[in-house]
Structure formats: C-alpha cells, structure tokens
Amino acid sequence: MKITLASAPATELEVDALAIPIATGQQLGAAAQELNVAMGGVLGEMVTNAEFRGRIHEVLPMPAQGRIRPRRVILYGLGALHDLDGQRLRSAHHELVRASRTWGYKRLAIMGVEPLGPDSLKAVVEGSVLGTFERRSRQTGQAPERREIQEIVLVGFGAGREAEVIAAQENGEATNRAREWQNAPGNELTPDALAQEATRIAQRHNLEVEVLGPAELKSGGYNLLLGVGGGSARPPRMIRVRYHGNHQQGAADSTVLALIGKGITFDSGGISLKEPEHMSRMKDDMSGAAAVLSAIDVIASRKLPLDVMAVVAAAENMPGPTAQRPGDVVVSADGKTVEILNTDAEGRLVLADALTHALRNGATHLIDLATLTGAATVAIGHAASAAVSNDDEFWRLVEQASREAGDRVWRLPIYADYRVLLSSNIADIRNSEYGEAGTIMGGMFIAEFAGGKPWAHIDIAASAWNTNLELTTVLRGPSGAGTRLCIELAEMMSRKATDSWPPATSERVTRAGR
Ligand code: BES
Ligand code: MN
Ligand code: ZN
C-alpha cells in the first residue's frame, strides 16, 4: 500500500473516498465546512441531526453524487476528545481502513482537519496500516473477506513529511508482522522456525546472529530453558540478534539495550497441564518474541545510533516422558537454584536464562516482553500491558515511549513484602504458584535475574490478544503489542545516546534483590 501526502484541494482528489474525522459533541471544523458546502450541506445535516455522532469506530459513507471529485465522502468517529489517546486514535483509523476495505475502496483520502492536528500524522498512518492486516489465510479456495487498498492520500498534514510517513508505515507493518507470527499455529512456528525468522532478519541487515541448540544450552548452563523445552520433541533455542549502532554517528556511548522476548511456541502447561478450553490460544505464547524480532528489524533498517540486541528464549512447553516435573530443582544459567512448583509458570523460567544471556553479552538496559500471566487480564484487561520495573529513570523512558507509540503500558508496584512469596524450602527461589499479585510475582521472579541493571518487564498476556468480543475499540485477535513500544524506546535511547545517557546517578528503587 502506498501512502502519499497531497497538497491539492481535497475536493479535487481522484479517490474512491474522502474521509473526515469527527469527535463526539463536535461540529464540522472550517475545512470540513467548506467540503460540506460543496456537498450541498449533507455532512452538516448528518451531524446536526445526530445520525452521525462521532463515536469511536462509527464509520458512515455517503455518495458524493458528482459534486466533488471523490466518489464518496466518509464521516468517521474519534469518540470523545478527552478520551482520545494514541491507542484510540490508531484504533479509529484501523476501523476506517477496515470499513473501506470491506466496501472495496482502492484509493482512500484522509483529511487532517480538526480535531486532528498535524502532530497526529504518525498515529493516523500507523492506525491505517494496522487496518490493512489480513490474517494469512490457511483456508483453501476462499477469497479474502476484505479487499486491499492501493493508496492512502493524506491531505492537510503539511508538506515535506515523507520521511515521517515512511517511518510510521514501517512501524505499522512491523506490528502486522508480529501479528502474523502470533497467529501462526504451533506446528508451523516451532522454536527452530522462530530461529530461522530471526536469522532471516539478521541476514537482511547483515547483523550478528547466534542460535543456541540443546548442546550449546547445556554447556552454557541454560538449564531453565532446557527444562521447559524438555518435554517437547522440538528442541529449544536461545536466539540472539545483535545490531551495532553505536559507531553509526560516533556516539561515544556504551548503552546496550536488550529487547528480550518470551518465545514459547506452544504452552500446554507441561505436566501442570492446562484445561483444554482456550488452550489453542497458547500458540501466541511467543508474542513477546514476535514483538522484539519485528522491532529489531525496524531498528536495524533505520540504522539507529544505538547498540540493540534481541534475545528470544524459544521452547515448546509440553508434557512427555522427558518433561520436567513439579518439584524439580533446576540450576539457572546464573547459578541460582530454582524449585519448579508449577510447570505452567514456564515463562519466567525461560526469561530468567534469557536475561542472563543478555547480560553475558553486554546488555546495560533490559526490557522483556512476555505473555506471562493470566492475572494480567484480571488486573488490567486487554486495553493495556501490565508492567513492573526496578528503575524509575528507565521506566519514565518506557512510559514516554509507550505514549509516543500508542502502545499502552501501566506499571504495577514491586513490594518488598512479596519477596517472601518467592522463597523455597529447598532452593534459592521458586516459580510461584498462582496466588495473589500474580503479575507482580511473575515480574519479581524475573527481576532476580536482571543483575541490578535497569530493567522493565512488560506482561502482554492480555494486551497481545483481545479475546473479549464486547471490547470492540481494542484491537481484537493478535495485536502485536509491544512492537512499537520497543521501536520507540530504541529511538528515544538513541537520541539520548548523543546526550549523556544513562545519567550518572540513576535512582534505582525497589529492586527485587534478596
Ligand atoms: N502463557 C501463560 C499465561 C497466559 C494465560 C497468557 C492466558 C495468555 C492468556 C503462562 O505461561 C501461564 O501459564 N501462566 C500461569 C502462571 C501461574 C501458573 C503462576 C497463569 O497465569 O495461570
Ligand atoms: Mn504457562
Ligand atoms: Zn506461557
């Protein structure tokens, strides 16, 4: 899909439809009013008569009947302005594009008129690209439900902003690639297939790539990852893609950002087997891996002046004669003994070894993304990712990136009081049983392996896949949660790299040390 910036008057555009944003309780702005006059007043009538209210996801097409060049005019809703954040703005455009695809429009123009300011360009483009997502069909001989848009023309967003459009389009496409991977069945996207995807990305940009199989994992002491993968016939992989960007613009900076993804290609629960209901969704237990791989693809292609690595701990969590058992004690790569109480709490185990692997390879800042706990859905629901962090300074940056990317995160606290819940009678630490503060406990387990470095943990168990059909303004199905967050974080840190980052005295708080 082509996305272009136009300076010609909207009424002169050779497009199938011209779309105009409206928020609830708003009248037509000046530019829309002009169009309204050209249209003989029908737009104003629909709004005044409240046949169109501007609610988010409301999309109303009207024939232009030859009064203007575009064949149709579309009114589309943004919802109430005070509710409008980056995520909802993207969602509104996602819906506009999906509706347009349903109606078979090939060329769609979007007017950057009030209440959309020029600064909404990124959200408009990213949201629109999200709306082009089509689950790769594995149904034979069936035409796709929606057609493809060939071109989106942006009017009134200002001139000379092509680079911004391209970057936003890349961000949207990266998110869609993550969604595609999330959607891929477990028998296709195995740990090895995930490693192959990572290798393809690395080759495309000439990056360093390393894939550890069982033998290397054993000699590196990555027993937590080996234990989780032990019940499967498809062996686990530790995948690392390294992008060297520091030398790019001579940035004398030693920051190495590690993007760490949970890559469980299927989570049956292992011996602590899950209920059959909804188990099929566990093919998306590699959503964190999808996000970090998609992100480093963009980071490398953009040649950001920052060192970034993606680390993916990939395994299939299965029961079987060689599976680990509840009660097993396993020695982690960094030497801690871990009592496995529940084999279904496997995400924190593989991530622990992944953090160690990142630290061994020089990471100075860590962010992990994981579909870690069902409790995240209870705590915060599908509309945002739940997070914990050991560092206020780093967290502020993550939060800022989240806002900028329209990829919501919400931080939960780490309380020292909960540390006791990680203690084991027989080992250094246990993988906690499901109890209170499940999302926090998952994060606190992982924090033990952060080596005191600034670290944030993003639990995308709920945000990666909205299963709530009533929750219509949140992307349903695979969402690619965390992809744009990682890209944005790297962008921000690479800008900071030219200043002095990290700051000499970073206030390190509530580290879950023991
Ligand atoms: N992958 C699941 C978490 C999950 C659940 C993601 C539902 C998406 C939807 C994770 O490995 C898991 O099984 N977590 C357990 C942890 C518990 C045993 C401490 C959970 O949340 O029940
Ligand atoms: Mn599990
Ligand atoms: Zn899992």
Image (cartoon, grey):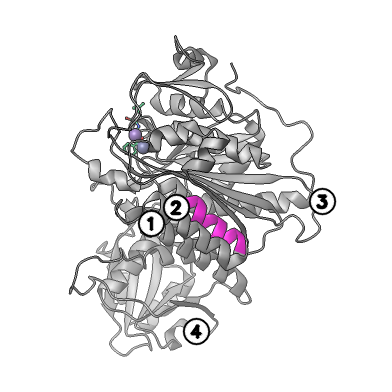
The image's mark for residue 252 is 3
Residue 81 shows in this picture? no
Reading the image, the residue beneath label 4 is: 9
Callout 3: helix, strand or loop? loop
Q: How many marks?
A: 4
Viewer-nearest of labels 3 and 4? 3
**Majority secondary structure of magenta residues:** helix
489 falls in the magenta region: no
**Label 2: few (<14), some (14–19) or many (≥20) C-alpha neighbours in 10 Å:** many
Give yes or no for contact between labels 2 and 1 (Cβ–Cβ under 8 Å): yes
Going from the N terminus, do you reach mark 2 or mark 1 first? 1
Q: Residue 280: x and y, percent? A: 24, 45
Quadrant of ligand 1 in image: top left
Reading the image, the residue beneath label 2 is: 290
- Residue 408 in the figure: left or right of residue 333: left
Please name whichever residue, 91 or 43, is drawn nearer the observer in this view of the structure: 91
Q: CA distance from mark 3 to mark 1?
A: 36 Å
- Tell me if residue 19 comes above or below residue 459 in the rendering: below
**Label 1: few (<14), some (14–19) or many (≥20) C-alpha neighbours in 10 Å:** many
Give yes or no for contact between labels 1 and 4 (Cβ–Cβ under 8 Å): no
Reading the image, the residue beneath label 1 is: 181
- Please, what is the three-letter code of the amino acid marked with disc 1? Trp
Going from the N terminus, do you reach mark 2 or mark 3 first? 3
